[in-house]
Amino acid sequence: MIANLFVFICDATLEDKETLDLLGRKFDLMILDGAFPECALGLVYRLGVPFMYINTVGFYTGTMSLAGNPVPYSTTPAFYRPLTDDMNFFERIYNTISTLFIDLLYIPTMVCLQHMVWRHLGSDIPIVWNLNRNVSFILQNGQASVTYPRPLLPNVAEIACIHCKPAAPLPKDLEDFIAGAGESGFIYVSMGSSVKAANMPDHLRKLLVQTFARLPYRVLWKYEASPALLTDLPANVKIGRWLPQQDILGHRKLRAFVTHGGLLSMFETVYHGVPVVTMPVFCDHDANAAKAVTDGYALQLDLETITSERLVRAIHKVIHDPKYRREAMRRQVLLKDQRSTPLETAIYWTEYVIRHNGAYHLQSPARNLNFLQYYCLDQVLFFLGVVYLLRALTRLYLNPRIIQLGKEKLH
């Protein structure tokens, strides 16, 4: 179970000698991954330093919510569901239930993790869930043109595509392979670093090989196994254990990108203005793909129902229908039109937090409100209680007198 995995990782981290060595050093600031940082928050408390988050998963808003940032279920899709910010009534119900369900599962995980932190760092460590609320600043891996427009507090800045860069010339072997395609161009296929293509089921590998053989393009395929193991590899396909993805995406002869839909890959494809065919695998891939499809530069296929024919059609469609590249390039312009680069933004705010000893003046008091208080549900319950009380008092004291007065008038 995933909950047990978090606790196991926390235990291994806190008993590691290199981790414990940190407690004897002095820091001005700690920067943590915002996805499930509670284990490290015990270290933050023990060191007594300000801390920041980098939310690498752009659609994850859990730590933003704890910091008091508005993340209403009506327009904030769960990062692991294929939803967008424009949901109908039933999608909003589904989104709310999904989010609340994960929040409820999170509670027992935090209880176990809290005991783990106490065992390693001392029983005086406060509830790590509450330590979350004292975050100084959050660097969110998002931007309105590639994720969603959101209301952000002063202690949140978006840094989507902080890793993106202009394309450099390709190595000679790759360039020679691409040149052999002439002006027909080539397709790039990669399932990213979190999904190993070499570990895919054999039927899916054969499906991809059959698909590539049918394409009138050359194919660069990030595949981690040895070429000797692929005896059925078509002549138009070249594989590599690692390929310079951004240099490939920025190549003028690239016609389409076939990918799992990882967030960094989706940012890169917008940065370089390339149409995409996505095949989501897990985690945020469905949400990333849903956004790209909504924005018009991607087609999405389901791995459970995919066929060679569907994949061929999808690739041809994103190549030959000009709207896909047009929308990719439109998003590219929007993404790049910023006052400062994402890296400059991240550097500025990191130094700002250090300069101002945690910059706690940027924090919102909303972070200290519980669910009922934040959404004024306690007030709604209060007014409902008052109305109920007045109604009960009216029935108890006034109704008998009104009835009595009515009888007296009749007589």
Image (tube, rainbow, N blue to C red):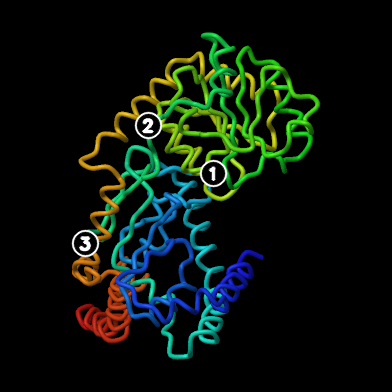
- On the image, numbered disc 2 is attached to which residue? 166
Query: What residue is rendered at 44% in x and 55% in y?
Result: 60
Tell me the quadrant of the picture where the C terminus can be found: bottom left
Query: What residue is rendered at 43% in x and 26% in y?
Result: 250
Residue type for callout 1: His
Residue type for callout 3: Tyr
Residue 285 marker: 1
Query: What residue is rendered at 31% in x and 61% in y?
Result: 69
Decide: is 212 above or below 278: above
Looking at the image, is mark 3 or mark 2 nearer the viewer? 2
Q: CA distance from mark 3 to mark 2?
A: 28 Å
C-beta proximity under 8 Å, tags 3 and 2: no
Determine the secondary structure under disc 2.
loop
Q: Is residue 157 left or right of residue 296?
A: left
- On the image, numbered disc 3 is attached to which residue? 352
Determine the secondary structure under disc 3.
helix
Q: CA distance from mark 1 to mark 2?
A: 24 Å
Residue type for callout 2: Pro
Looking at the image, is mark 1 or mark 2 nearer the viewer? 2
Q: Quadrant of residue 46?
A: bottom left
Crowding near the residue tagged with mark 1, few <14, some 14–19, many ≥20 C-alpha atoms within 10 Å = many
